[in-house]
């Protein structure tokens, strides 16, 4: 596949400052954080839909609260009923996803009873969009970084085998990303880890006037929620962690496991496709393995001779971008018809639709410009997880990943290579996320999730001392608000009453 960064598309873990007292306690006198906790947000109307916007301040470095400050953007949709419980803070994942933008979507997707009782609140985490956005690369340089074409570095069609010159190119591209962060973002790149974002979220909780936090986190948002619970267990009211990340895996292991989940999701798509008359990979008499072999052959051919494209944006429809397009569509079962259409065009030699879908995955604009999403995604992931510092360790892992996950394994494992060059002082030390003494925390896992494998939800529910696992036997990335009445009812009940479903509940 492609992408010096795709392995990180689901999002990962947390770091840095420890001053501020033990988890779950108020910050000690003299810590200098009181002025942040004493804030109240000056809300202003910012839309015809009743939205209100504002900002709150946090220290860039919690160990130096008197130093530089960051302004964090926040958006609120007031509760629709007269007797609100408080605020429901939401995060869409990424890392790099805008909570400000997501707040409106969340307000439409939560159950009516939840909408009636909660203000829906989203914030852009530090380094994202409206909150001191971190930038590393722009335009064509970001294209080059995202879509590393392994076939061009090997001279053949096997992305698991990279030549010596190819390794040099990979190292150069990934070092260049880190150098771009230093050039464009300075010290901010050292302070975007999830533990610091969790501390920001506690400042937000206080500014909203809530004694305890109610939270809905999707994908990377689950890791943020787990970090919050671990640091502030006594300030937890109800946390929904939907599409959970593995709580402790390092960068390489995470990429390998994500590739396995993507292969499971791909096989589910192909199985569904073969039962439909418009499937470009075969018909009802064909097996899943033969259909995937046909798809693999298409991608290998595109690696040698890119498909044609009607897009005038400088990208070539080679294997890398095509695989990104496929992976993008596996995030939602609702995208499967679009993927069938795109693959049918690709079989006829036109990669335009898959290129468009690949651009969607990384918020790539029509003008070859990107949002801040990818820069923030990589920076947070590299701050959060331990990584080998030797490119040879990645090379060995890629061999194993390619054997276990032939379509996605190589790219998703190589995708963490940037973290080998991330400043060591910014990388979190591994710690258990067990959140002792926290009330019940609801972890939701989807059995055929393409981005956050079901095994990760199982691992997070085990590691959190009060974790309760709710399983959705289905397809797509995350479960709440995706059409399962069983999941939606369980989550709504938990948010309203702080009462989780029975451990082991399975929904379809």
Image (tube, helix red, strand yellow):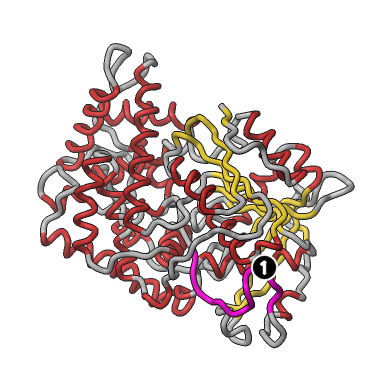
Write down the quadrant of residue 108 in the picture.
top right
Q: Name the residue rendered at 63%, 87% in the picture.
A: 66
On the image, the x and y values in percent for residue 207 come to 75, 68
Q: Which quadrant: the N terminus?
A: top left
**Horizontal and vertical percent for residue 188?**
49, 75
Q: Where is 275 relative to 90, above or below?
A: above
Q: Quick one: label 1, few (<14), some, or many (20+) residues within 10 Å?
A: some
Q: Is residue 325 magenta?
A: no
Quadrant housing residue 173: bottom left
| Residue 53 image point, x, y percent | 72, 61
Identify the residue at horizontal 47%, vertical 55% (top origin). 247
Residue located beneath label 1 in the image: 24
Observer-nearest of 128 and 85: 85
In the rendered image, the quadrant that contains the C terminus is top right
In the image, taking residue 48 as reference, residue 342 lies left or right, namely left
Quick check: 324 left or right of 89? left
Q: Main secondary structure of the magenta part?
A: loop
> What residue span does the magenta drawing correspond to?
14-27
Q: Is residue 28 visible?
A: yes
Above or below 59: residue 466: above
Using residue 215 as the reference point, say whether residue 283 is left or right of it. left
Question: In the rendered picture of this protein, how many numbered marks are placed on residues?
Answer: 1
Q: Is residue 12 above or below residue 241?
A: below
Q: Residue furthest right?
A: 82
Label 1 element class = loop
Determine the residue positioned at 69% across, 33% down. 489
- Residue 143 in sight from this viewpoint: no
């Amino acid at each position: 596949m492609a992408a010096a960064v795709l392995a990180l598309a689901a999002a990962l873990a947390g770091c840095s400052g420890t001053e501020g007292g033990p988890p779950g306690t108020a910050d000690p006198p003299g810590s200098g954080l009181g002025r942040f906790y004493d804030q109240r947000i000056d809300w202003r109307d910012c839309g015809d839909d009743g939205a209100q916007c504002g900002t709150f301040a946090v220290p860039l470095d919690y160990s130096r609260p008197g130093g530089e400050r960051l302004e964090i953007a926040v958006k609120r949709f007031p509760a629709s009923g007269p007797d609100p419980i408080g605020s429901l803070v939401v995060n869409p994942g990424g890392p790099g996803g805008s909570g400000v933008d997501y707040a409106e979507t969340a307000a439409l997707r939560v159950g009516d009873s939840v909408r009636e009782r909660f203000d829906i609140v989203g914030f852009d985490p530090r380094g994202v969009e409206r909150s001191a956005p971190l930038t590393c690369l722009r335009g064509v340089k970001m294209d080059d970084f995202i879509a590393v074409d392994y076939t061009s570095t090997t001279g053949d069609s096997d992305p698991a085998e990279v030549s010596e010159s190819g390794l040099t190119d990979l190292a150069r591209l990934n070092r260049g990303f880190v150098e771009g962060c230093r050039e464009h973002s300075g010290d901010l790149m050292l302070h975007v880890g999830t533990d610091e974002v969790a501390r920001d979220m506690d400042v937000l909780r206080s500014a909203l006037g809530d004694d305890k936090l109610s939270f809905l986190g999707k994908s990377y948002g689950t890791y943020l929620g787990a970090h919050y619970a671990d640091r502030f267990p006594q300030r937890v009211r109800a946390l929904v962690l939907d599409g959970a990340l593995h709580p402790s895996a390092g960068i390489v292991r995470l990429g390998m496991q994500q590739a396995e989940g993507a292969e499971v999701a791909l096989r589910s798509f192909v199985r569904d496709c073969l039962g439909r008359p418009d499937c470009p990979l075969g018909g009802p008499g064909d097996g899943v393995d033969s259909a995937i072999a046909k798809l693999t052959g298409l991608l290998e051919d595109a690696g040698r001779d890119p498909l044609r494209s009607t897009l005038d944006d400088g990208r070539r429809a080679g294997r890398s971008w095509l695989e990104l397009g496929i992976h993008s569509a596996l995030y939602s079962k609702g995208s499967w018809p679009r993927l069938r259409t795109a693959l049918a065009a690709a079989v006829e030699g036109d990669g335009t639709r898959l290129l468009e879908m690949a651009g969607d995955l990384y918020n790539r604009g029509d003008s070859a410009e990107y949002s801040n999403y990818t820069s923030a995604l990589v920076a947070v992931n590299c701050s959060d997880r331990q990584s080998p510092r030797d490119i040879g360790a990645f090379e060995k892992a890629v061999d194993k990943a390619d054997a276990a996950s032939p379509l996605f394994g190589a790219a998703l494992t190589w995708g963490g290579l940037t973290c080998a060059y991330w400043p060591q002082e910014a990388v979190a030390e591994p710690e258990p996320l067990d959140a002792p003494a926290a009330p019940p925390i609801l972890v939701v896992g989807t059995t055929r999730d393409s981005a956050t494998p079901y095994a990760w939800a199982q691992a997070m529910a085990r590691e959190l001392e009060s974790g309760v696992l709710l399983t959705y036997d289905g397809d797509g990335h995350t479960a709440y608000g995706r059409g399962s009445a069983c999941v939606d009812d369980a989550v709504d009940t938990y948010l309203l009453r702080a009462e989780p479903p029975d451990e082991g509940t399975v929904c379809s």
